[in-house]
């Protein structure tokens, strides 16, 4: 299905992707009707949108049923009553990612990245390498600006790097990137999927419409991936931290793609998980037929993204790291395994239905003590009481200060919550910035 300007499009949800799709539809001289659950006063650009489109705020009504295609925000669960109603009427439903794919110019190639953890770092690293190689490229999707906010329907953009969530993949019908990367699969978003298997199937959807001329970059160390990869029609390229027969591998103190090697100490991003992210990025550069040696050189100038094992500061020999983006157990496990020195870890937030006992072994091995705050305190108490030193606090400020008061020189204090942030914060960025502000305040007090 390609774009048809004679159809009327319904936009459900007016976050950045919905608004970008609406304006792209208008630019392409088609009609869009905008529908938002929140009241107009809660939407920043509501007045502007009301001038430019037919809109409804404060709920999704039957007016949407007059539209032939719905572009559904990833924030709306597929179980929502309006979506069930639309389904019963036979209305086509797509994500903004699918819509962008349908309208993009033919000369641009897409590199799409998904996985439970590491998506933002890997997508940003690929974009960084492409820019260093002098390519005209954009970074979009679940990171930065929406896919449709760029002039993707016009020729000239060589490469489009997309970070993609499972929610965005749930509503695709033709999306077929030239290179699709699946970094890992671990339990996440179990509040939105019936079970882990359903979540995995959603992630695997990134390969569904690829053909034999495309590439699938896959983590060979993930049993959840390798047991599901038979249906993939694209050429499979595996990366691994263990296997020596993978196309890309960690080989002692080097990462290696084919015969080309790069010392892990030349990378500015820390930890085994980031070495795997770098391998996935470099495999995609190779798959595109670009200069791998130059790509490796470019990778060495890439710095960690904010809120992803980001070094904040050192006070009296105690280092602080902000890993607020660690919103699930697997991501926090990677953080725990990234340090050679002891960790005092700050955990807790809003619940996504995870089993926190999965972290017990890693915490026992790598953490001196865990400082727990947020809505998941009781769940974490049940998981770890008597198994490792724990301290419970009312807020993030108390947790950080307590950890610092008890820390010895040479230790690391790491915010890596293993939870979403919606109990006390707007998002993980807000939580990370709050952590950094607390560290700044402690430093000022010590001066």
Image (cartoon, grey):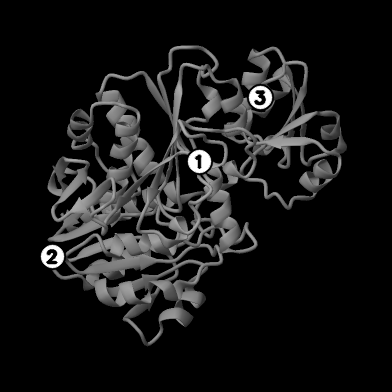
Q: Who's the residue at 40% across and 56% down the image?
A: 326
Residue 81 vertical placement versus 285 (above, below): below
Q: Position of residue 327 (x, y in %)?
A: 45, 57
Check whether the beta carbons of the residues at disc 2 and disc 3 lie within 8 A of each other: no
Give the tally of numbered discs. 3
> Counting residues from the N terminus, which is met first, the one under dot 1 or under dot 3?
3
The one of 105 and 269 positioned closer to us in this rendering:
105
* Residue 201 on image: x %, y %: 57, 53
* In the displayed structure image, the side of residue 132 where residue 138 appears, left or right: right
Which element carries disc 3, helix, strand or loop? helix
Residue 233: image tag: 1
Residue 280, percent across and down?
33, 43
1 and 3 marks in contact (CB < 8 Å): no
Quadrant showing the N terminus: top right
Query: Where is residue 82 shown, x and y percent of the image?
Result: 79, 45
Instruction: Say which label, 2 or 3, has the lower sequence index.
Output: 3
Q: Name the disc covering residue 97, or none.
A: none
Image-quadrant location for residue 279: top left
Mark 1 and mark 2 in contact? Answer it, CB < 8 Å.
no
Q: Residues within 10 Å of mark 3 (few under 14, many from 20)?
A: many
Residue receiving disc 2: 410
**For residue 126, side relative to residue 421 (left or right):** left
Residue 417 visible (yes or no): no
Q: What residue would you read off at disc 3?
A: 22
Q: Residue at 75% across / 50% down in the picture?
A: 80
């Amino acid at each position: 299905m390609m774009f048809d300007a004679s159809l009327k499009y319904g936009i459900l949800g007016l976050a950045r992707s919905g608004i970008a799709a609406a304006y792209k539809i208008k630019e392409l001289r088609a009609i869009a009707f905008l529908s938002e659950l929140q009241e107009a006063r809660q939407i920043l650009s509501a007045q502007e949108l009301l001038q430019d489109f037919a809109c409804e705020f404060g709920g999704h009504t039957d007016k949407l049923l007059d539209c032939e295609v719905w572009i559904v925000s990833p924030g709306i669960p597929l179980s929502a009553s309006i979506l069930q109603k639309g389904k019963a009427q036979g209305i086509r439903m797509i994500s903004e990612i699918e819509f962008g794919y349908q309208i993009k110019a033919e000369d641009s190639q897409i590199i799409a990245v998904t996985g439970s953890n590491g998506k933002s770092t890997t997508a940003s690293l690929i974009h960084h390498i492409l820019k260093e190689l002098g390519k005209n490229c954009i970074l979009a999707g679940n990171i930065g600006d929406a896919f449709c906010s760029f002039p993707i329907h016009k020729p000239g953009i060589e490469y489009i790097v997309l970070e993609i969530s499972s929610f965005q993949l749930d509503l695709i019908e033709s999306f077929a990137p030239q290179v699709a990367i699946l970094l890992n699969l671990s339990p996440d978003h179990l509040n939105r999927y019936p079970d882990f298997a359903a979540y995995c199937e959603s992630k695997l959807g990134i390969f569904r419409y690829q053909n034999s001329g495309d590439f699938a970059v896959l983590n060979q160390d993930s049993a959840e991936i390798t047991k599901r990869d038979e249906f993939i029609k694209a050429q499979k390229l595996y990366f691994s931290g263990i296997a020596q027969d993978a196309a890309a591998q960690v080989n002692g103190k080097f990462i290696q793609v084919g015969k080309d090697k790069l010392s892990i100490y030349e990378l500015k991003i820390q930890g085994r998980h980031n070495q795997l992210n770098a391998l996935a990025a470099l495999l995609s550069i190779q798959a595109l037929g670009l200069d791998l040696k130059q790509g490796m050189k470019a990778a060495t100038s890439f710095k960690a993204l904010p809120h992803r094992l980001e070094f904040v500061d050192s006070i009296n020999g105690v280092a602080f790291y902000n890993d607020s983006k660690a919103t699930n157990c697997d991501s926090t496990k990677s953080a725990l395994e990234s340090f050679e020195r002891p960790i005092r870890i700050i955990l807790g937030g809003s619940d996504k239905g995870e089993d926190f006992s999965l972290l017990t072994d890693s915490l026992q091995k790598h953490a001196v003590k865990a400082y727990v705050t947020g809505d998941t305190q009781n769940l974490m108490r049940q998981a770890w009481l008597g198994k490792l030193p724990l301290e419970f606090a009312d807020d993030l400020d108390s947790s950080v200060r307590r950890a610092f008061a008890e820390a010895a020189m040479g230790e690391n204090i790491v915010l890596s919550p293993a939870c979403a942030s919606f109990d006390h914060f707007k998002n993980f960025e807000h939580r990370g910035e709050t952590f950094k502000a607390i560290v700044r305040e402690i430093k000022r007090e010590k001066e």
